[in-house]
C-alpha cells in the first residue's frame, strides 16, 4: 500500500474542457434532447467537477461577434474575463469558429474565393484580440472545412500555401500569440488538409516563427487517421510541439464519436497517459483537455457525468502508469521477451 501510494505521488495535472462539451444532444438525424444550459451556469460546473481551464470558441466568449464593433467585442470579452476570475478559472485557448458562417461554406483560409479567405483571416485576428482579453496567448485551429469533398475542386498545393499565409498573418498580428493546430483527417470534409500532427509540425517549421506554432492532438482524430494516438503524441512531444490534448475515445472508423476517454480502448488510453507522463506533458502549464460529448441518451439533470468520468479514467490510468513494475519491464525489454512484456501490461491493467 505504502509503495503504491509513493508511486502515485507526483506532479498534478490541470484539466480543461469547452462549453460545447455540455451538449444538448442534437445530431445529424435528430434535434436536441436536452435544454440548453446558460454559459454562466456551465462555468459554475467547472470547479465542481475538478476542472480549472476553459476552452473557448471565439463566439462562445462573444456570441454573434460578426455583427459587433471591435470595441463592443472587446468589452464583452473583458466581461467574460471577469466571470472567469470570479470562478477561479483560466482561459486555455480561443478557437475561431470558421465552419458555421455562409462565408466559410467552401472553407475559410482555403476557400477559392478571395473575399471569403479575407473574412477567415479577419475573424481569426479578432479571435486573437479576444484571447488576449481573456488572458490566454493560445489560438487553436481546428481546420474544419479546410479540405474538399471532391479532389478537383481545389488546388491542394495552393491551399497549403494559403493556410501558411493565414498562420503567418496571425503570428504577425500579435508578438505573443501561439497557434495550436488541431489536426483531423475528415469530417465534415471528405478529406481535410493537415490531417495528422506530422502535417501540423511541418506547417509550424515552415511558418515565419516556428517557436510559436505547435499542436493539439485529439485521440479520436488520430484514430480516424488510422494512427495510434500515443505515437502521435510522442512525435509532437519529441518536437516540443504538444501544447494541448483533446483526450476522448473512438470506436473504429466512423463519425467522430467523442466518447469518454478510455471507454473504447483502455490499453490505448493507458499508453496515451504513459506517453504524456513520461514526456513531461503539463510541466509548462499545458492542460489535459477532454473533448468528450454528452451521450444523447443522458437525462437533463445528469449531463456532465461524462466529464467527471473521463477525468476519473485519466486519473485511474495515471495510477496504473505510476505503479507499473518498471524493473520487470526493463528485464523483458533486455531479454527481448515481448510476450512476457505483453502479459505484464495486460495483467497490470486487469489488476491481477
Ligand atoms: C471537432 C473538434 C472540435 C474542436 C473545437 C475546438 O472535431 O474536435 O470539437 O476541438 O472546435 O477547436
Ligand atoms: Mg477537438
Image (tube, rainbow, N blue to C red):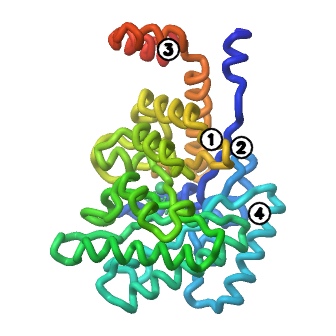
Q: Are marks 1 and 3 in contact (CB under 8 Å)?
A: no
Q: Residue at x 34, y 11 (%)?
A: 336
Label placed on residue 50: 2
Expressed as whole percent of the image width and height from the top left, the position of residue 203 reads: 41, 63
Q: Residue at x 68, y 54 (%)?
A: 53
Q: Residue at x 18, y 71 (%)?
A: 150
Q: Are marks 1 and 2 in contact (CB under 8 Å)?
A: yes
Q: Are marks 4 and 3 in contact (CB under 8 Å)?
A: no
Q: Secondary structure at mark 4?
A: helix
Q: Which residue has dot 4 on it?
A: 84
Work out which quarter of the rendered image holds the N terminus and state it.
top right
Q: Is mark 3 within 8 Å of ligand 2?
A: no
Expressed as whole percent of the image width and height from the top left, the position of residue 330 reads: 48, 13
Residue mark closest to the camera, 2 vs 3 = 3
Label 4 or label 3, whichever comes before in sequence order = 4
Cα–Cα gap, marks 1 and 4? 20 Å
Q: Are marks 2 and 3 in contact (CB under 8 Å)?
A: no
Instruction: Report the front residue among 43 and 175.
Output: 175
Amino acid at each position: 500500500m505504502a509503495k503504491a501510494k509513493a508511486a502515485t505521488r507526483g506532479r498534478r495535472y490541470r484539466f480543461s474542457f469547452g462549453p460545447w462539451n455540455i451538449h444538448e444532444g442534437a445530431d445529424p438525424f435528430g434535434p436536441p434532447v436536452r435544454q440548453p444550459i446558460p454559459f454562466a451556469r456551465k462555468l459554475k460546473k467547472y470547479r465542481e467537477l475538478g476542472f480549472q481551464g476553459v476552452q473557448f470558441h471565439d463566439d462562445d466568449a462573444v456570441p454573434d461577434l460578426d455583427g459587433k464593433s471591435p470595441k463592443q467585442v472587446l468589452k464583452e470579452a473583458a466581461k467574460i474575463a471577469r466571470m472567469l476570475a470570479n470562478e477561479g478559472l483560466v482561459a486555455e485557448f480561443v478557437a475561431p469558429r470558421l465552419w458555421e458562417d455562409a462565408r466559410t461554406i467552401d472553407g475559410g483560409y482555403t476557400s477559392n474565393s478571395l473575399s471569403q479567405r479575407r473574412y477567415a483571416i479577419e475573424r481569426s485576428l479578432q479571435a486573437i484580440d479576444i484571447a488576449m482579453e481573456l488572458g490566454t496567448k493560445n489560438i487553436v485551429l481546428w481546420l474544419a472545412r479546410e479540405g474538399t469533398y471532391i479532389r478537383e475542386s481545389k488546388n491542394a498545393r495552393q491551399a497549403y500555401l494559403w493556410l501558411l499565409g493565414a498562420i503567418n498573418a496571425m503570428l504577425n498580428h500579435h508578438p505573443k500569440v501561439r497557434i495550436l493546430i488541431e489536426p483531423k483527417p475528415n469530417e465534415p470534409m471528405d478529406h481535410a488538409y493537415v490531417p495528422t500532427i506530422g502535417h501540423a509540425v511541418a506547417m509550424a517549421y515552415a511558418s515565419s516563427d516556428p517557436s510559436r506554432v505547435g499542436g493539439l492532438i485529439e485521440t479520436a482524430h488520430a484514430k480516424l487517421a488510422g494512427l495510434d494516438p500515443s505515437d502521435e503524441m510522442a512525435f509532437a512531444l519529441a518536437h516540443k510541439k504538444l501544447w494541448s490534448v483533446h483526450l476522448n475515445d473512438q470506436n473504429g472508423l466512423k463519425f467522430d464519436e467523442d466518447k469518454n476517454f478510455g471507454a473504447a480502448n483502455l490499453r490505448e488510453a493507458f499508453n496515451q497517459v504513459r506517453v504524456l507522463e513520461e514526456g513531461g506533458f503539463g510541466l509548462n502549464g499545458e492542460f489535459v483537455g477532454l473533448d468528450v460529448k454528452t451521450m444523447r441518451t443522458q437525462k437533463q439533470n445528469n449531463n456532465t457525468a461524462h466529464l467527471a468520468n473521463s477525468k476519473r479514467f485519466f486519473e485511474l490510468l495515471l495510477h496504473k502508469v505510476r505503479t507499473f513494475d518498471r524493473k520487470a519491464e526493463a528485464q523483458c525489454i533486455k531479454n527481448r521477451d515481448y510476450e512476457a512484456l505483453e502479459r505484464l501490461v495486460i495483467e497490470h491493467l486487469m489488476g491481477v
